[in-house]
Amino acid sequence: MSDIKHDALLSPVGVRNLQAKNRIWMAPLTRSRATMPGNVPNEMMAEYYRQRSGAGVIIAEATPVTPWGHGYYATPGIHSDKQVEGWKPVTDAVHSRGGKIVLQLWHVGRVSNSALLPGNGQPVSSTDVISESMSYIDDTWTRAKNTAPRKLETDEIPGIVEEFRDGAQRAKDAGFDGVEIHGANSYLLDQFVRDGVNKRDDIYGGSIENRIRFPLMVADAVADVWKDEDGGASRVGYRISPLSEHKDVRDSDPEAVFRALAAGLGQRRLGFLHSVETWDRSTIDPRVATVLPAIVKSFKDAGGGLYIGNGDYTPEQADNAIVNGWADAIAFGKLWIPNPDLEKRIAMDGPYRKPEPETFYGGGAEGYINFEPLEVGASS
Ligand SMILES: Cc1cc2nc3c(=O)[nH]c(=O)nc-3n(C[C@H](O)[C@H](O)[C@H](O)COP(=O)(O)O)c2cc1C
């Protein structure tokens, strides 16, 4: 072990109940391999996560809390008993290897298509303006345009909060170590936070306080389910992507709105805040350098736990981020896909296999669970 290069990444990190054996986390990755119909997790998924249980914490793929929250074909859900049963072998597999796994709770909002929704209904959102995204709607794996959404009525919001509460409870029943609320990447909660898309004139639109109201109601409900003995919520995280912008999914003042949101999450003593800083470090928005630390400071000053950085990090950049105090841990995404023993490879300074985008979504074992570990026996 004398030639270990990435000491900082390999050191443990923890906040109260979510202690991790290293700072190399696995970012949530939609792989669209749930059993259809029913969006049920399966044995192949258990094997996939088992292989990656050397991560400090695995943040499992985005998982809708309601049938109305699906926006892509074959994504697993956490809204039926069958899905809870399907997740249990996944959490057991990770725990049997001494790993930790939290579930990302999801509602896509307008990023959907009627073909995926109950009764071929309309997606819901803060707005009735259509999303420019495309999504997979069946096993032909061709992308279809989103369907125009229906603007949620003011009195419908508490019902969606309850769906997040139910999802959080089901995640607990399924044996997860915690949950991450998906507030990033232009899905439902983001559709309320950012003023480029939220033009509402009720208590969920307009002022910053109003736009973060729904996300904080969700945080309250989820934290209530996962409450620590001391009243905190150290097993609950929240994901943001404050500077990722696409068409109307942007904010006129991202620093102000995400600082306010982060402070609210910190007051609830969430265990971690997780940010997609960029998808491509070579074209990173220069505002990240100042806006992100301000958001993290708001979270921590208010009582929040760890900051988890993400976005196109190399192990070298990640190690520097830890050493420089930028982040407490780094979540790698794509790198985990062809490198199921990533933490071992980082300890040995590589080599790393390159991700193969053609097998990211859908399909079977190929590109999913067929990657050999670095050394025979190293990850079995
Ligand atoms: C195949 C794939 C699936 C993804 N699925 C999710 C997801 O379910 N939830 C989420 O918040 N982000 C998702 N992302 C974004 C990643 O978590 C991460 O933010 C992004 O890939 C940048 O980090 P990386 O360069 O380390 O992969 C996905 C990205 C990829 C490539």
Image: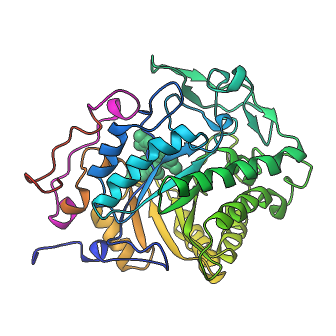
The question of residue 350 being in magenta is answered with yes
Residue 198 within the magenta-colored segment of the rendering: no
Q: Which picture quadrant has residue 116?
A: top right
Estimate the x, y position of residue 375 in percent, counting from the top left. Answer: 9, 54
Can residue 312 be seen in the rendering of this structure?
Answer: yes
Residue 294's place in the image compared with 70, above or below, is below
- Asked which quadrant contains residue 327, the reply is bottom left
Residue 134, x across and y down, in percent: 57, 28
Residue occupying the point 79% across, 47% down: 159
In the rendered image, the vertical position of residue 186 relative to residue 220, given as above or below: above
Q: Residue at x 70, y 35 (%)?
A: 110
Q: How many marks?
A: 0
Q: Is residue 371 left or right of residue 150?
A: left
Q: Tell whether 290 sits left or right of 102.
A: right
Of all residues shown, which one is farthest toward the right? 201
| Residue farthest top in this picture | 140
> Residue at coordinates 60% horizontally, 77% vertically from top-left?
304
Q: 88 or 33: nearer the eye?
A: 88
Q: Does residue 280 show up? A: no
Highlighted magenta segment, given as a residue range: 345-366
Depicted 365 relative to depicted 252: above or below: above
Quadrant location of the N terminus?
bottom left
Looking at the picture, how far across and down is residue 161, in whole percent? 75, 52
Q: Residue at x 50, y 35 (%)?
A: 75
Please state the horizontal and vertical placement of residue 171, each as a whole percent of the image. Answer: 54, 53
Magenta stretch: dominant SS? loop
* Visual colour scheme: rainbow
